Amino acid sequence: MTAVGARWLPMLALALSWSASSARAELPASATLAVMPFHNLNQDASLDWLKRGIAETMIADLRDAKRQVVERDQLDRALAEIALQGEKLSDESRAARAGRLVGAVAVVVGGYQRAGSELRITARLVTVETGVVEQTAKVTGPLERVFSLQDQVVAQLLKLPAPKARPKPREPKKTLQAYEAYAKSLQTSSDAEKVEELRRALDLDPDFHYALFDLRALESRLNRLLKRSNQVIDQRTQALLATFDDARATPYDRHLAAIQAMTALMSQLRYQALLEVATRVENTKLPDAPQSTPGMRFDAREFAGFAVFQSLSALKRGDLALQVGERYLQRYPGGAYTNGVDLQMRAAIEQRHRHDESVKRAAKELEELAFEERDRERDGKLSAQLARTFAFRRCSILTSGERWAEAVDACRDFAKAYAAADDSDDLVKLAWMLIGRSLAEQGRFDEANDEALRLLDAHPIWSREHSIEMIRRTWPQP
């Protein structure tokens, strides 16, 4: 027997044991299923998105029920392969052939049509081994209750007990719009468009768990791709730095390699590594930079001076950044980055003035808060709820007053004190977010990142609404 034949034996045995017992026997819980895109039976263009939507949410529900389900991409490849063969097949024959290609025991095929405000969904369960329809389902109900209709279809096809009624959506129209956005995310091959549609779905309905699951899965995949990309860039950067260090290389190649290496680190927001490389380039004796074109010259040391300034600014080392910026302006008058450095320095000085004003304002507000809290306590009117309000106001005032170190302590005290009672409390989550911001403003990015990841893991919907991941991505990367 060939290796290919041996691979199919377990599935064949499972299929035979099922069909031999009874043509209408219950599908074994271990059987692998596939779900085909549903047909839009009355060609209602406004509901085309349900073709993918019903199939994908049904796949998710089957997985939640601990059933083995073929991945959507795997089934798409099988259907594309069948389409290339150009044969005209019935739904059942196409399902059976696709099922064999992906290793499924049974395949769900079906369609839907709208009649007024109602939606009718029909489905059939086709066995791969025989191509025979083993079970059918038909349900009708309001379009806004489409998920409950899908639950009934799954229960009928798999001969399960009647499903529990899902809670009625708080805003049925928005939930349906979220479903449409989610379904559209399944129809595009662009990751950027997928993310946009999934986020739109969650904006419409933060409890739309299908979109949340897919968004997290997509972000996880993108993170893996980003990690791989960073590894490739690291290898390229090391090769460029080797060229920069090679005294036998031409001056042109050495200057160009150094600039390309620093640019790569800057694009990755790896400012600590950039600071080290740029400082090294500044302190290396290099031949004069050659002209790249007549009248134009690029200088790795000048770019390094700019890169050191940028790195220190990003790493929140403001005083040192101002010193380095001034040194750059003195050393390279009329340089390529003079205007940029000058503008950033002026903005930093203006921010310093605003910081001083914020600190003074916070001091006054804290004093007023302390008086109010003492008065309430003296009069016996300091309830537990009011004490909680005072504690959060202290955290908030210190943050807005840019007293970052004190803000970390005050916000952490608040979060720890009240998280035990209710970790889902929005004020507790906001306190953790303010801790992360305060740590980042002090240049303590590793700690800030830890706080952001904790929030993302514990409260993904709230974190998305408050752009925690986007904020985290703007911080210097390790």
Image (tube, rainbow, N blue to C red):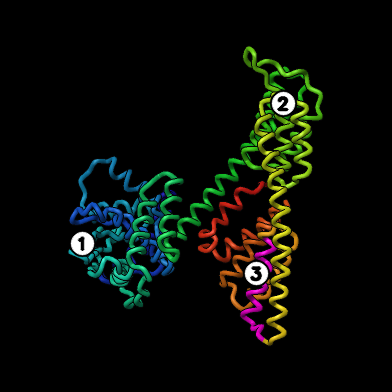
Q: Percent x, y for residue 203? A: 44, 59
Which residue is under mark 3?
393
Which residue is under mark 1?
114
- How many residues crowd around disc 1 within 10 Å: few (fewer than 14), some, or many (20 or more)? some
Q: Nearer the viewer, residue 121 or 212?
A: 212
Which residue is under mark 2?
300
Q: Is residue 357 left or right of residue 433?
A: right
Q: CA distance from mark 1 to mark 3?
A: 53 Å
Residue located 22% across and 69% down the image: 140
Residue kind at label 3, given as amino acid type: Arg
Residue 128 is drawn in which quadrant?
bottom left
Q: SS at mark 2?
A: helix
Q: Is residue 367 left or right of residue 81?
A: right
**Circle 1/circle 3 CB separation < 8 Å:** no
Between label 1 and label 2, give the one nearer the viewer: 2
Q: Main secondary structure of the magenta part?
A: helix
Residue kind at label 1, given as amino acid type: Arg
- How many residues crowd around disc 3 within 10 Å: few (fewer than 14), some, or many (20 or more)? some
Q: CA distance from mark 2 to mark 3?
A: 49 Å
Q: Percent x, y for residue 439? A: 70, 57
Residue 362 is drawn in which quadrant?
bottom right
Q: Which residues are magenta?
A: 381-399
- How many residues crowd around disc 2 within 10 Å: few (fewer than 14), some, or many (20 or more)? many
Residue 387 belongs to magenta span: yes
Q: Is residue 123 left or right of residue 278?
A: left
Q: SS at mark 1?
A: strand
Q: From this view, report whether residue 263 is shown above or below residue 295.
A: below
Residue located 71% across and 52% down the image: 355
Disc with the residue nearer the chain's start (1 vs 3): 1
Residue kind at label 2, given as amino acid type: Ala
Total labels: the figure holds: 3
